Amino acid sequence: MIKREPLVKVGTFLTNFALKTHLPVEGLIKSTVFDHFCGGVTEDDCLPVIEKMYSKGVSSVLDYSAEGKEEENHFDFTVEKTLKTIDFSHQHESIPFAVFKPTGVGRFKIFEKMTAEEPLTEEENAEWERIIERFDKICKTAYEKDVPVLIDAEESWMQYAADNLIEEMMQRYNKKKAIVYNTLQLYKWNRFDYLEDLHKRASEKGYKIGLKLVRGAYMEKERERASKKGYISPICKDKPTTDDNYDSVLKYVMERIDTISIFAGTHNEKSTMLLLKLMEKHQISPNDPRVWFGQLYGMSDHISYNLSNMGYNVAKYLPFGPVRDVMPYLIRRAEENTSVAGQTNRELMLLRKEKERRKL
Ligand SMILES: Cc1cc2nc3c(=O)[nH]c(=O)nc-3n(C[C@H](O)[C@H](O)[C@H](O)COP(=O)(O)OP(=O)(O)OC[C@H]3O[C@@H](n4cnc5c(N)ncnc54)[C@H](O)[C@@H]3O)c2cc1C
């Protein structure tokens, strides 16, 4: 159903309306789109899914996916949740990474003002200090428990502040190996230059770089804002340019694997194949801990399970949280799956092909 764009548009509108007006739709969401893309409401709910996937060699990244909260107590709650997932990960071999979102631990507006280099009020300065403390608490715990932590990337107008803060964390905790991972969204045309600069800084200061490589999930929003405000869109002009950007970065990092560890978060078969070839070319063994492949739960099982079957490190992001709070995540998944070149269409085509093959 989610490959049909009009249905997703109407469905998104109706779902948001129903949730806002407190209509009893959570049960319906839970038994459909939620169960497809999420592991459950709590970490414990996710355990059966984690074990099932791990029995086939596919690991999990527990992702507390409540979004859009603005209160300080919620930010502290997210920190506690993330520390708990680090602990969970420390105890379970099947959960090799922890993850969090910058705006899960601090107000979007503060990141936005810091990115725009606007002065903060005294109160906002104190808020920013608390954000730094929260980042540090998570990264320090990750370091002490030896659990690498992935930090998600979001909208470009808040990301500069997050990048700087994450670099500071890398400098602090990545002296021996990558514990703190930033995310590069390669639909942004300036990320290759950023990576080259980052590599220079890391070499000078003597720390390792951890990177999750993705294409990016906020394209429509980015383009809309750029056109509304009249600045050049940070997004590549078309899909092939994004694809080239992604693949060029794969080549760049594989040549520098001694200093850069990666988590390639993609459902793109071509980029996945390219990374396999690059690993072979550079004689990097499939289970080298510096290279991980990642997909989202509910998507691209054909990639995840084939990779694990061949002995590669592969993990699926497994979102969890209250149904209402993970809606922004679910809506992003529905929206990105509607395009003709989108993952759902590709997967459906493969499933149909396989069904035909089995009939024969
Ligand atoms: C494990 C994991 C973690 C993720 N974490 C994040 C994160 O922290 N932040 C984040 O933003 N996203 C994240 N994503 C989502 C990711 O950015 C993509 O939205 C999603 O994976 C689809 O891209 P793809 O590489 O899988 O495949 P594809 O289907 O090949 O690529 C689709 C993507 O290409 C780009 N694209 C499509 N059309 C155009 C166009 N016309 N012009 C330019 N570019 C275009 C868009 O980024 C689109 O999402 C994550 C994905 C995974 C698998």
Image: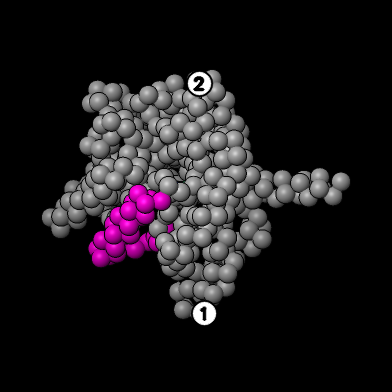
Tell me the residue at 51%/73% (across/down): 26
Tell me the residue at 31%/30% (across/down): 208
Tell me the residue at 49%/47% (across/down): 59
Nearest the viewer among 191 and 44 is 44
Determine if residue 135 is in view.
no
Label 2 residue near ligand 1, CB within 8 Å: no
Q: Is 69 in the magenta?
A: yes
x and y percent of residue 98 in the render? 37, 49
Q: Is residue 20 above or below residue 325?
A: below
Q: Hey, which quadrant is residue 309 in on the image?
A: top right
Tell me the residue at 64%/63% (across/down): 7
Q: Is residue 281 above or below residue 5?
A: above
x and y percent of residue 94 in the render? 46, 48
Q: Is 74 in the magenta?
A: yes
Q: Which residue is mark 2?
A: 283
Q: Which residue is mark 1?
A: 24
Query: What span is colored magenta in the figure?
Result: 65-92
x and y percent of residue 265 in the render? 49, 41
Q: Amino acid at mark 1?
A: Pro
